[in-house]
Each structure stands twice: as C-alpha cells, then as structure tokens.
Image: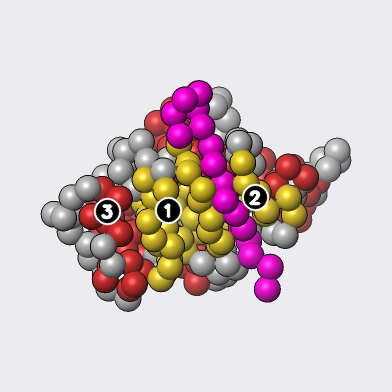
Amino acid sequence: MTPVVDIQHVTFTYGEKVALDDVSLTVEEGDFLGLIGPNGSGKTTLLHVMLGLMAPDRGSVELFGQPVEKFDQGERIGYVSQQATNRGGSMPVTVRECVRMGRFAHAGRGRLSAEDREIAEDALQRVNISDLADQRINQLSGGQRQRAYIARALASEADLLALDEPTVGVDAESRDAFYQLLDELNDAGITIVLIEHDIGVVTDRANRIACINRKLYHHGDTESFVESDALSEAYGTTGTVVHHHH
C-alpha cells in the first residue's frame, strides 16, 4: 500500500539555523499520527514540508505516491493551521459559505451543484455545527471555528487531515469534544496528522507518535513511544507525564 506521506532524509534550514536534520518518516493510510516535540523543535516546519508548503534543502517528500512538488490534488488534504484558530476572524463569510469552499475544487469553473451543497450541509451536520451555519466565522469561538474548518475539509472529501495545535485557546470541554470528533473521523478512515503540545492528549488519542527536536527521536506506535526514552532525549527532561489509554 502506498503511504499517504513518505518523507526521506529531509533537511531544512532557516539561514544558519537547522530546523530539520535528516528526518525520515512515513504516514500510512488510516494512521492517527501525533507529532510532538519542544517549542522550536521543527514540528510546524515538518508539517509544512510534508504538505508541500515549504521545500526542503535536501531529501524527498511524496504525497499519495507523487512527488510533493508535482502533487495537484489539494482537495485531498484538509489543513488547519494554528493561526486559523487565533486569527480566523478576518474572513467575512458565514460558516456555510466557508464549508462550501471545500467543494470548489470539485465544481471546477462551474457553479456549485445541488449535490455540492448537500455534501456541505452533511459536513456541517457531521461536526455538529448546523445551527451555526448562518453565523459569520468571526463570530465563533475558537472551538467552533475549528469545527467549521474541519467541516470544510470534510466537504472537500479530504483523505488527510493535518492539524497544527488545533485547540490553542479552546476551553477544556470543547477540547474534549473536538478530540472525540477526530477519533470518529479517524475511525471512519481519514488519516490524521496532529501537532499538539499536550503530550498526554496525543498518547491517549494517536496510534503513532513522531517525536522530534530537529532530529527524529521516535517514530512508531504509541506504546513503544511510552516505553522508550525518546521523550527525555528530545525534551532534555525526565519529568513529563505521559498518559496512554489504548
């Protein structure tokens, strides 16, 4: 089976500063990969390289079996950045209009069809925000806004959902509900890559862990990560609590 993401020997630098040093990992179809590491460890850079938003200095990246620089099926990827939660108020559109944007790639140059609109409504319902459809994105809480962006990815029929610290600024109750939604989407077959600073949440939810601090310290199943020394090696500490409920 072709991996969803295949990264081989990737190095990325910002000027003199090395952000990623010879990182290799794969994301298989159906994985829920938690991407963890201390602040400034290269997590977001790795996610951007993974999605083709940045080109590595060395190494290769493939998405769905294609070189990332030639990949032209953007609708297969749903990307929700950390800035989307923090700044999402700048988009003067309703929630329904935002979610319908997920159908644009399928509609081509034509107008959205009745089927496109129905798929968007289904996506709103699936993430439980149909009651917010007519509100503007900038009127939503952080947690509601993230659900709107997830719904847009679902409307585009994305196969890969990439999330960069999606619950920053979201209250605990909304956060729990959000991660329950991610579990359901993953169970339904959507591959997920998640950056999250709360290591306990990651080990409770993800079935695979990639732990980095410029270099890759662990890439494998969650259980082997919990039993390894990768956390202390990457973070330089031994006092971090790791939950694991699989």
Question: Where's residue 132, x and y in %?
Answer: 47, 43
CB under 8 Å between discs 2 and 1: no
Q: Which residue lies at the image location 40% right of the left edge and 31% below the top edge?
A: 86
Q: Which residue is mark 1?
A: 216
User: Is 102 positioned to the left or the right of 195 in the image?
Assistant: right
Disc marking residue 244:
none
Q: Which residue is mark 2?
A: 61
Task: Residue type at mark 1: give it.
Answer: Leu
Q: Is residue 19 magenta?
A: no
Residue placed furthest toward the right:
110
User: In 3D space, how far apart are the residues under numbered discs 3 and 2 (Cα atoms)?
Assistant: 26 Å
Q: Which residue lies at the image location 60% right of the left edge and 54% below the top edge?
A: 8
In the image, the segment drawn in magenta is 1-18
Q: Which residue is mark 3?
A: 233
Disc 1 packing (10 Å; few <14; some 14–19; many ≥20): some
173 to 13, vertically: above or below: below
Question: Where's residue 161, x and y in %?
Answer: 55, 54
Q: Is residue 219 visible?
A: yes
First in residue order: circle 3 vs circle 2: 2
Q: Is residue 145 visible?
A: no
Q: Nearer the viewer, residue 1 or 13?
A: 13
